[in-house]
Amino acid sequence: MSAADKALFEREERFVMQTYPRKPVIFERGEGALLFDESGREYIDLLAGISVASVGHSNPQVVAAISEQAGRLMHVSNLFYTRPMVDLAEKLSNSSLGGRVFFCNSGAEANECAIKIARKHAHERGAGEPEIVSFESDFHGRTYGALSATPGLAKDPKLGPMLPGFRSVPFDDATALREATGGNTAAILIEPIQGEAGVFAVSDETLKVAREICDETGALLIFDEIQTGMGRTGSLWAYEQGPVRPDVITSAKALGGGTAIGACITNRATAPVLGVGDHGSTFAAGPVAASAALAVLDQIDRPETLRRVRQLGAILTEKLEKLDGVVEVRGRGLMLGVALAEGIDSAALNADLLERGLVCNAPRPDSLRLLPPFVLTDEQADRAVAIIESALSQAVAG
Ligand code: PLP
C-alpha cells in the first residue's frame, strides 16, 4: 500500500462514518465491465456497484444524456413539470404494471413509498391495524420503514424501536405465510429473488400462494425488484418469468445507471392510492437522473440485451459449476450466487480475488455473489472464470 493510499484510508476513518468495511482499493475510472485503480491497474468488475452499472461503467449513452441535460437544467423540484420525468414514468409504467410511478432517490425510499401505499390502501378497505409481511431473510433497505421489513437487521436492539405493523415468516414458507396473514394484512412485501441474503429465489408455489392470499384479503402483493429488476435476471422485471403479477414493484439500483433514482410502480387499481400531499421528495426524478434512466432503459429494454443477459448467465453458470470448490450456482440471468465447498471462506476468497484483479462480493460465508455488467464480453467472462479457478484451487489446497 502506498503512502498516499494509507493517507486516504486514514482520512476516511477520521471523517467518514464507519458504517462500511471498505476493501483496500481506490477506484478512479471505469469503462464497460472494467474498473481501474489509481495506479492504473485493471479489474474485471463482476459486481457492477451492487447491480447498478448494468449498462457498464461510464456508459457513453448515459454520459451523453447526463452531460447534455446538466448543461441545460439540473433541478427545479417537483413543484413543476419536467419532460424527462414524465417520459420516464410513462416508459416504466408501460413496461410493467400499467399504473403510476412515484419517484425517489434510492431503493429504501422506493420501498418506503410502497409501504405507505400499502398502509393507506389497507385503511381504505377498513383494516384496523395494517400489517406488512416479509420473509425473515429479506433485505428491503436501511430507512426505518424498509428496515422494519428487513427482519435480520431490524432485530438489532441498538437500533430500536422499529415501526409497528411488520411481521415476518421463514423464507419461502407458504404455510407460514398463510398463517401470518389475514384481514389486517396490508401487503406481502418480498424480493422475488433475494439478493443480499445470497441469491435465493422464492419458489413458484409460494409466489402463487402469496398472490392467492392477497386476492382473498385485499392486501397488496409488492415485489421489491430493486436488485432483480432492470434486466438483471434476463427479463426487464423478474416477475415476468414467474407465475404471478404483483400489484406494486419497486426499482432503483440499475435504473439510474449510477445516478441516484428510485421508483415505486403500481398497477392501475393501486395508482390513485397516494394523492396530493401524501408523499414527496425534493430531488426525485430531477431532469439529470431521469435523463440518465431513460438512456439506461433504452439500452436494457431490448430483446437483444435481455437475451445476452440470459446467454451470459448460462455461460457463467456452466463454467463456474465445473470448478473445483464450487458446489452450486444459484440464480437467474446475471444474478448469481456461487456456493462454495465446505471449508472455503467466501470473505477470504473474495479478498484474494480482489488482489487478483476481480471484483465481486461475499454476502454469506459460504457463497460469492456475481452481478456483472451486462456488457461483460465473452473474453472478460473467460478471464474472470480463470481468476476464480486459480483462487479456488489455492483455497481448496489451503
Ligand atoms: N431492496 C433490495 C432488494 C436491495 O438489494 C437493496 C440494496 O441492496 C435495497 C432494497 C436498498 O436500496 P438502497 O441501498 O438504494 O436504499
Image (tube, rainbow, N blue to C red):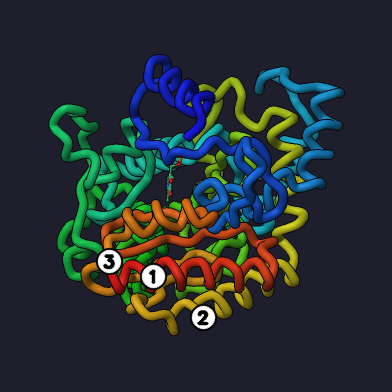
Q: Which of 158 and 172 lies nearest the eye of the viewer? A: 158
Dot 2: element:
helix
Position of residue 18 in the picture relative to residue 184 (left or right): right
User: Which residue does the numbered mark 1 point to in the structure image?
Assistant: 392
Give the crowd class for mark 1: few <14, some 14-19, many >=20 residues within 10 Å: many
Give the crowd class for mark 3: few <14, some 14-19, many >=20 residues within 10 Å: some
Q: CA distance from mark 2 to mark 3?
A: 19 Å
What residue do we see at 39% from left, 62% from top?
368
Q: Check contact, mark 1 vs mark 3: CB within 8 A.
A: yes
Closest to the camera, between mark 2 and mark 1, is 1
Give the crowd class for mark 2: few <14, some 14-19, many >=20 residues within 10 Å: some
Position of residue 239 in the picture relative to residue 364 (left or right): right
What residue do we see at 72% from left, 35% from top?
85
User: Which residue does the numbered mark 3 point to in the structure image?
Assistant: 344
What residue do we see at 73% from left, 71% from top?
303
Q: Locate residue 60, reporting x and y percent.
A: 81, 46
Label whose residue precedes the other's in the sequence (2 or 3): 2
Q: Locate residue 70, reporting x and y percent.
A: 80, 26
The image shows a total of numbered marks equal to 3
What residue do we see at 32% from left, 67% from top?
395
As drawn, the label of residue 319 is 2
- Relative to 281, is 330 above or below? below
Q: CA distance from mark 2 to mark 1?
A: 13 Å
Position of residue 178 in the picture relative to residue 393 (left or right): left
Label whose residue precedes the other's in the sequence (1 or 3): 3
Tag 3: amino acid? Ile
